[in-house]
Amino acid sequence: MMKKRLPGILLVILMTTAEIFAGNGNIRLQGSTKKVVSVGETFQVVYQLNGERGSFETPDFGGLQVLSGPNISSSSSVQFINGHISQSHTVTYSFYVQAVKEGVFHISPAAVTVNGKRITSNKLTVKAVMSGSATTQNNNPNAGNTRQNSSSQNGTVLSPDDIFIKAKVNNTSPYLGQQVILTYEIYTKVPTSNLNFKKMPSFDGFWSKDLLDDNAPLKQQNRIINGEQYVVAEIKKTALFPQKTGKLTIEPMELECNVQIRVQRKRHSRGYDPFEDFFNDPFFNNNVKTIKKILRSKPIVLNVKPLPQKDKPAGFSGAVGSFTFKSTLDRNKLTTNDALTLDISISGRGNIKLIEAPKVQWPTDFDTYEPKITKKINATAFGISGRKKFEYVVVPRNPGDFIIPPVKFSFFNPDENKYYQLKSDTMFVHVDKGKGGGTTVYTSQGQEDIRFLNSDIHHIKSNCGKLRKKGEYFFASNLYYTLLALPVIILLLTIIIVKNRRKRRNNIVSVKNKKAHKMARNRLSKAMKLKKAGDDKAFYEEVAHALWGYISDKFNISQAGLSMETVKEKLENAKADSNTVDMFIKILNDIEFARFAPGSAKDKMEQIYSEALDAILKAEKTIK
């Protein structure tokens, strides 16, 4: 029975298929977008063509900044009504656009050529206003919301909740000089790369210290916020110490980054298709668009309180935090003209770098000098801590028994809202008479201010100058000719030294250039070992080091001066072909995406390794 029906079924299929492709219908190109947008907002301009894909002509956006586009997608639908089958085909051309200033912008009609026929769209007008006014001025908010929701489901629109940065402090009402930890975090649900700080706060009224290493990899974690999973990373952490009271404002920080958006196919109205879900999986969908996004944090206002005057110790010099105090005298018995050393060490957490040297009351018979200060400051994610050491060296000039009063150090602990005063023990020093020695201490310039110790001393001029024979003159002497020739000798030596330095520097640059390929191959070999060991994060870091290091060695550029633009510019200037340049940029972007994107990318390790090796080999052959 089935064999008898088969020819009839095939005939019906052939007839209906012919009918599908025979229909031509009216071809139309229709453009749509928001009527009112905010300045700085990223919005979408969409053109829909109800026909087969043709040659598209991009319109003039009239002062609007185009971030990406045209992004092309298509869909088809088939209908069976009363024994007749019809097919419709829709092609969508979308642009991501941003208004950089206020005003009314006119977008000229777009055009597409299909089967030799040129079709134009309607003209669009967009009004850009300051933030907060756009949502109430759109003529058709329901239609705009529907389009945005549909696009969001297809992954083509970047909403403000998809990626943002947040600034926070651990204390909004600190005391004067109290340590405040300022943290900047990035929250993202989409792949992000090439983080670039566009504007950093000046921190007026604060002494600041960075707590994170700029070259260290970002530490990431997953957080659930309002039912949505985000990848969160600390991008900046700073310790702030307010230096004046009142309201101090921390200005917003601006960050520029590249954001990848996956453009997925739209679901057809014909119902559920398991094959469509399979091919719409992000692993197979290569329709990825990269756009630039500028993120801004919100300003933070701190209300800095003055230190309390109640119970404030005499001699308090502004130390705020939690500290310990220790003093050590190297010996208490010595002879005149020997050195005596007093070490004072202050350790703890707070504004330790701003702590001044404690005052010591030395006996008048001691020659004193400025203390030697050494410090060890630790900047960690928890704030500033460390140790500051003051080394006092004095020389007793007369024998006897002397007393050094206790050395005092006071600080304010903001956690306990309390002053503390620490002090050393009273120190006793016995000085015996040594060999030689004087009894005079100069307290200021001028002989009239000399203090006499134990007995009076008359001023005796001991240096009468150097005597010379009569008839000897400086002119035409050996010293005269030596000094006359000295500038020429110094000039010649300077020229020789500069030439030698240039020669050594050129040799170093040449060696690095020749070994660039070898060093890159060694790093890729190490990356292959990491791949076999299953360490994907370390693998991507090593491949990135191989590519960046190759460019650094080949063109003698420091690692700090490397960027995507620098790589492209140097390769193009070296006459590398466009395929090699594009391959380098693509691999670097893929590595950044794999290192920062949520989830694992182990399946692409072999592909990235092969592409990186191929890119280095091609660059080595084509660079002139």
Image (cartoon, grey):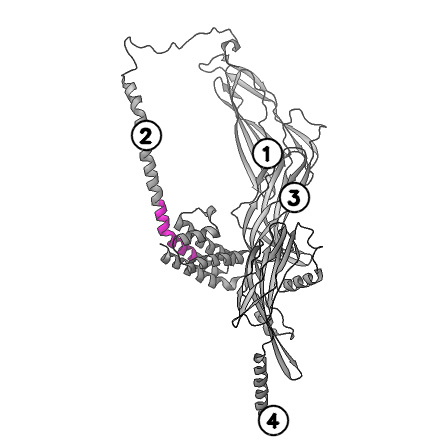
- Mark 1 and mark 3 in contact? Answer it, CB < 8 Å: no
| Residues in magenta, as a range | 508-525
Return the residue at label 2: 491
Q: Secondary structure at mark 3?
A: loop
The correct choice, above or below, for 128 with respect to 310 in the image is: below
Callout in the foreground (1, 2): 2
What residue type is disc 2 on? Leu
The correct choice, above or below, for 479 with respect to 349 in the image is: above
The span from disc 1 to disc 3 (Cα, nearest Å) is 27 Å
Whichever of labels 1 and 3 marks the residue nearer the N terminus, that label is: 3
What residue type is disc 4 on? Met
Q: Is residue 111 magenta?
A: no
Whichever of labels 4 and 1 marks the residue nearer the N terminus, that label is: 4
601 displayed left or right of 252: left
The span from disc 2 to disc 4 (Cα, nearest Å) is 110 Å
Residue 352 circle label: 1
- Mark 4 and mark 1 in contact? Answer it, CB < 8 Å: no
What residue type is disc 3 on? Pro
Return the residue at label 3: 299
Residue 1 circle label: 4
Q: Secondary structure at mark 4?
A: loop
